[in-house]
Amino acid sequence: MASLDLNLVSFFNSAMPAQPLGWFKEEIKDVSQLKGLKYRTVGLAADVLLEMGMSVVQLPGGEIQPAMKSGLIDAAEFNNPTSDRDFGMQDVSKFYHLASFHQSQEAFEITFNKRKYESLPQEHQSILRYASEAENSDFYWNNTLRYADDLITLKEKNGVNVFRTPDSVMAAQLDAWDVVIERISKEDPFFAKVVDSQKAYAKKVMGYLLLNQPDYGLAYKHYFG
């Protein structure tokens, strides 16, 4: 924050599950079906999907459903089964694809004026930090359950066909992401520093988790089919 001349203190808060790839007019079985599709997304995801050959349209949340209904866009993503259902996406599409790398690690932050924050007694600073950590956990626990409930509603009450995004699409996203981060890293040393830090963390931590975590899919199939 200081390097950007921002008088702020921020705490990591409310990590979210990976966002779905989104809503389409048909089931996506292969990455080739995405070529030329007019697709709504925002941020770095727009760069990635443009690199994959999609025609990206950046729209605010409230305009997504009307744009798909009118034919302005062919497909769209927003955030999660709850917000997507609230926007009425089930009324303009019956093909919903979960799993994607385009926004796989999103989180909020709680931000304070740095000068004001540092003027507080140490115990009050700690209360704010602990409150953010507590909300981080509460948000994740409550919202994963809410998303799961709304996904069931989309399938059982709204007639939505739910699919897992095929591996060919996600592999293409990774290839596109490599191109995007190489380009931006050459232009922005701070961006490059962040990416290098993320990769170092992921290599170490995911190396442990991938070796240690059991195959939860296997357990799920064992009990629920």
Image (cartoon, helix red, strand yellow):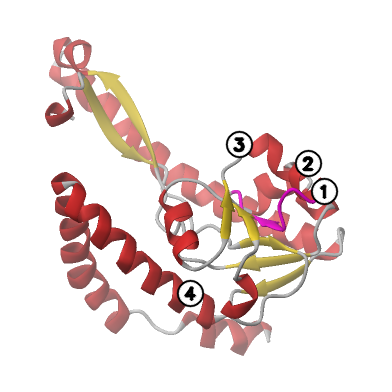
Q: Quadrant of the C terminus?
A: bottom right
Q: Which of the labelled discs sits on residue 69, or is there none? A: 1
Q: Earlier in the sequence, mark 3 or mark 1?
A: 3
In the image, residue 213 above or below residue 183? below
Q: Earlier in the sequence, mark 4 or mark 1?
A: 1
Q: Secondary structure at mark 4?
A: helix
Marks 3 & 2, CB-CB < 8 Å contact: no
Q: In terms of depth relative to the viewer, which is nearer, 62 or 17?
A: 62
Q: In terms of depth relative to the viewer, which is nearer, 37 or 121?
A: 37
Could you tell me the amino acid type at mark 3? Pro
Could you tell me the amino acid type at mark 4? Met
Marks 1 & 2, CB-CB < 8 Å contact: yes
Per the picture, the main secondary structure of the magenta-coloured stretch is loop
Q: Earlier in the sequence, mark 4 or mark 3?
A: 3
Q: Residue at x 21, y 65 (%)?
A: 199
Q: Residue at x 21, y 10 (%)?
A: 116
Residue wearing tag 4: 170
Tell me where residue 29 sits by quadrant: bottom right
Residue wearing tag 2: 66
Marks 4 & 3, CB-CB < 8 Å contact: no
Residue wearing tag 3: 60
What's the distance in space between the residues labelled 1 and 2, CA to CA? Answer: 5 Å
Span shown in magenta: 71-78
Magenta stretch holds residue 73: yes
- Expressed as whole percent of the image width and height from the top left, the position of residue 161 reads 78, 70
Marks 3 & 1, CB-CB < 8 Å contact: no
Q: In terms of depth relative to the viewer, which is nearer, 189 or 154?
A: 189
In the image, residue 199 above or below residue 133? below
